């Protein structure tokens, strides 16, 4: 199972595979979610952005140079912003060899390709709108893509999809466009600010470094837009003892680069 109950006397803590299986395969690629799937992760996390010609892709950084060979292919195009390259140009880039020669030829996936793979693997998705302020209208565009892929059907929305962002306005927009979708705000608003977020967020998702038992209790005390207690998914938790502690404090989810190890630790705790 992808959840652990033992640590918390019945409370379930979901483990989410952050960017796929990024210690085994290049982050956010199809190879990475397939590896996460092989390692038993039902939930995967990704980051969605938009190219110069308006195509949705999955990539973490707002620049291409850390996780592709763009500096070699387009040496004169610094600082290599995602928004300055067309999809055709991005598809020329190698998104695997920086990680290991074994992954040479891996490409930056489009959101469509990514969703096809997640669907094929029967995985669940924590989709992050990364820096949506750089991509006006991306909220509606992402929802349209998800709808085309069947991911806004009732069963999917109910069980398989969460949309999150560090940008609260983008989260609010997603909620207003499709109130049935579960949403998360990445950050740690003050306890006094939480009721404002409860109007459009089902989750508050802070760094584990600021996720205290008191903060989790304060979030749980509020009900989100769907009438259920708000949840806390915390990141990025790669230490098993920390994960067990957070689960024991009531965290509803831990987002991890080493999800299989964390899942095993939570099961055993
Ligand atoms: O899902 C939470 C986490 O991904 C947020 O930080 O920078 O890895 O996108 P980042
Ligand atoms: Ca992310």
Image: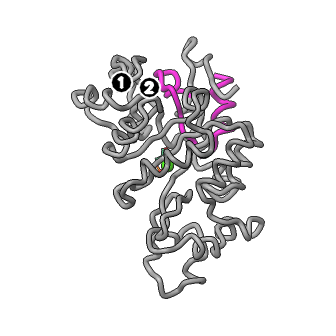
Label 1: element kind: helix
x then y, percent, for residue 138: 42, 53
Q: Quadrant of residue 171?
A: top left
Magenta segment boundaries in residue numbering: 244-269
CB under 8 Å between discs 2 and 1 = yes
Mark 2 sits on what residue?
231
Whether the residue carrying mark 1 lies under 8 Å from ligand 1 is answered with: no
- Graded by Cα atoms within 10 Å as few (under 14), some (14 to 19) or many (20 or more), the crowding at tag 1 reads many
Few, some or many C-alpha atoms within 10 Å of disc 2 (few <14, some 14-19, many ≥20)? Answer: many
Residue in the picture at 66% in, 72% down? 94
Q: Is 210 located above or below residue 64 in the figure?
A: above
- Is 65 in front, or is 147? 147
* Residue 266: quadrant of the picture: top right
Colour scheme of the picture: one colour
Q: Position of residue 74 (x, y in %)?
A: 55, 84
Residue drawn 47% across the image and 32% down it: 181
Where residue 219 is drawn, which disc sits there?
A: 1
Residue shown at the point (62%, 16%) measured from the top left: 6
> Which residue of the protein is positioned furthest toward the left in this rendering?
192
In terms of secondary structure, where does tag 2 sit?
A: strand
The part of the image, by quadrant, that contains residue 190 is top left
Which mark sits nearer the N-terminus, 2 or 1? Answer: 1
Q: Is 59 above or below relative to 37?
A: below
């Amino acid at each position: 199972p992808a959840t652990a109950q033992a640590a918390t006397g019945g409370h379930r803590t979901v483990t989410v595979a952050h960017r796929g299986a990024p210690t085994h395969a290049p982050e956010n690629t199809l190879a990475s979610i397939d590896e996460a799937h092989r390692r038993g992760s039902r939930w995967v996390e990704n980051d969605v952005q938009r190219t110069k010609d308006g195509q949705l892709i999955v990539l973490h950084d707002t620049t291409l140079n850390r996780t592709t060979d763009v500096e070699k292919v387009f040496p004169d195009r610094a600082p290599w912003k995602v928004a300055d390259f067309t999809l055709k140009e991005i598809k020329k880039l190698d998104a695997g060899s920086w990680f290991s020669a074994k992954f040479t030829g891996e490409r930056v996936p489009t959101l469509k390709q990514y969703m096809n793979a997640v669907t094929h693997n029967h995985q669940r998705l924590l989709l992050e709108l990364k820096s949506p302020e750089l991509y006006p209208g991306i909220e509606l565009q992402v929802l349209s893509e998800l709808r085309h892929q069947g991911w806004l059907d009732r069963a999917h929305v109910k069980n398989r999809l969460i949309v999150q962002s560090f940008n609260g306005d983008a989260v609010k927009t997603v909620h207003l466009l499709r109130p049935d979708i579960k949403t998360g705000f990445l950050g740690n608003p003050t306890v006094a600010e939480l009721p404002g977020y409860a109007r459009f967020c089902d989750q508050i998702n802070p760094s584990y470094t600021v996720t205290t038992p008191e903060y989790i209790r304060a979030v749980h005390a509020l009900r989100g837009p769907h009438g259920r207690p708000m949840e806390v998914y915390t990141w990025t938790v790669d230490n098993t003892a920390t994960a067990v502690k957070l689960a024991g404090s009531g965290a509803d989810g831990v987002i991890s680069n080493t999800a299989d190890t964390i899942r095993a630790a939570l099961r055993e705790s």
